[in-house]
Amino acid sequence: MNVKNFVIIGGGIAGLAAIKAIREVNTSSSILWVSDEDRMPYKRTKINKHIATGFSKDEFALTDHHWLMENHIELLYDTAETINTQKHELTFKHRGTLIYNKLIIASGKIPRLLNIDGLPAEKVHQVHTARQVENIIRSTVKSKKYLVIGAGVEGVETAEQLVKLGKEVILVERNSMVLKRFFTPKFANLMKKTIEKAGVHLLLDIKKIAYNESESGESLIWIDGQEHKIDTIISSIGYIPNTKLAKNADIKCNVGIMVNDYLETSAPDVYAAGDAAEHPLGQITGLWHAAEHQGHLAGLNACGKQLKLELKPFRMKTEVFGEYYFSVLPSSNNLTLIEEKVGDIVRDMYFKDDKIEALLMKNDGDRAKDYQQALMEKWSLAKIRKEIPL
Ligand SMILES: Cc1cc2nc3c(=O)[nH]c(=O)nc-3n(C[C@H](O)[C@H](O)[C@H](O)COP(=O)(O)OP(=O)(O)OC[C@H]3O[C@@H](n4cnc5c(N)ncnc54)[C@H](O)[C@@H]3O)c2cc1C
């Protein structure tokens, strides 16, 4: 049977970072990279931010065929369906079965399913893959009125793009604040004002959404009892780690695929990294740079290193409606908060023993890298005021 030294499942940034790490230390072993999407692996963070401009098929590609050939990497467009962890066997939907020496699962996350009585799945758009976003772009030719469900970061960014195209947008959220995963109530409120000022009809604290179809085929949506005629519905209600393959193989999963500090799963020679992985204290990172960092480490460890993952404070940043937001949320209540505001720049900094632990900032995007460095190196308040003065 065909044997591969390394098989990487998932054509995302964690998968690519793992491959690059393997090639840093090992130039000759065979590497198979598996992607179940319809194009060269691409920068997922870009897709929903380019609804207004559109994009070509490989515009956001992370690499190209030339690089793959030069580095002797085989890219297979297929779905990995089963793993026999005892025999180190992997079976694909189309390609058959092969033997792996080391396997890295970087299967990402999948969108939570929207469950509204009577609403057919084919009427609900998502922004998880480039193909799905292309469908939304196509819808903009005819649709005028959009409902975006979920005011997390992807939902807000999607609403912004539709407003840029002159669409009428209702953005609904069941929580009482936007970007609940990344913001404090103060920053959620700042962004709420940004969103409303841009003309989005933002509805928070929504308890019930109901659906019906008019005789002429229009979508009628009741949001907490209020009727709206909607042309296109987009769901952005969050994600869950894609554990399907791992679970079927009896690899230990909780919410995500459980890994130890070395990104090893419960199965021998099988690693997991990126959005699919759940770390020892239950953390699931869900951010681009965190996935890249984990993929890199998983690749090196699969080559025999024993490098321990330390979860760094990776930031969320987003630029919507002309405003820039940055967040690394405090992880405990025992931090000292310093609030500063000069002009339209707002920054809330959280310290423990005069070392910065968390930070939220608005409208200081040009210095985002400095803030990231301050967080990574845990700068003192005095150093921040000296190096990043307001
Ligand atoms: C619209 C959008 C905007 C975002 N914006 C930001 C942002 O601004 N900043 C930020 O930090 N993060 C952002 N994120 C999150 C970021 O994109 C993810 O954290 C990152 O892409 C995770 O990388 P990954 O490699 O773990 O997984 P993914 O990028 O999800 O890649 C996993 C890949 O594996 C494939 N796969 C799964 N199972 C199989 C299988 N069995 N066989 C073959 N292939 C399989 C999937 O189809 C997918 O292509 C955004 C996410 C989305 C959806």
Image (cartoon, rainbow, N blue to C red):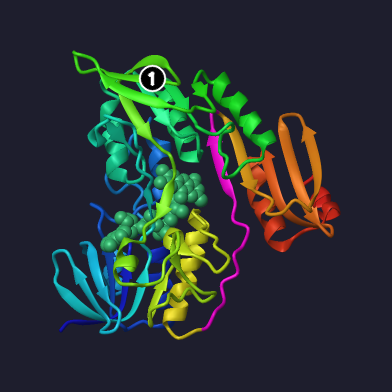
Of residues 261 and 84, the one drawn nearer to the viewer in this rendering? 84
Q: Residue at x 56, y 72 (%)?
A: 309
Q: Majority secondary structure of the magenta segment?
A: loop
Q: Is residue 56 visible?
A: no
Along the horizontal axis of the image, is 189 left or right of 74?
right
Rendered position, 275 above or below 166? below
Task: Please identify the quarter of the rendering in which residue 41 is found.
Answer: bottom left
Quadrant showing the N terminus:
bottom left
**Residue span colored magenta:** 306-321
Q: Residue at x 46, y 26 (%)?
A: 171
Quadrant showing the C terminus:
top right
Of residues 21 and 104, the one drawn nearer to the viewer in this rendering? 104
Q: Which residue is mark 1?
A: 222
- Under mark 1, the amino acid is Trp
- Disc 1 element: strand
Q: Quadrant of ligand 1?
A: bottom left
Q: Residue at x 47, y 61 (%)?
A: 291
Q: Residue at x 42, y 52 (%)?
A: 240
Classify mark 1: residues with Cα within 10 Å, few (<14), some (14-19) or many (20+). some
Mark 1 CB in 8 Å range of ligand 1? no
How far from the left and from the top, in percent, is residue 134?
28, 37
Q: Is residue 344 visible?
A: yes
How far from the left and from the top, in percent, is residue 267?
38, 79
How far from the left and from the top, in percent, is residue 384?
79, 51
Along the horizontal axis of the image, is 59 left or right of 177?
left
Is residue 209 part of the magenta span, yes or no?
Answer: no
Is residue 319 part of the magenta span, yes or no?
Answer: yes
How far from the left and from the top, in percent, is residue 61?
34, 53
Along the horizontal axis of the image, is 377 left or right of 78?
right
Rendered position, 371 above or below 125? below
Rendered position, 91 above or below 385? below
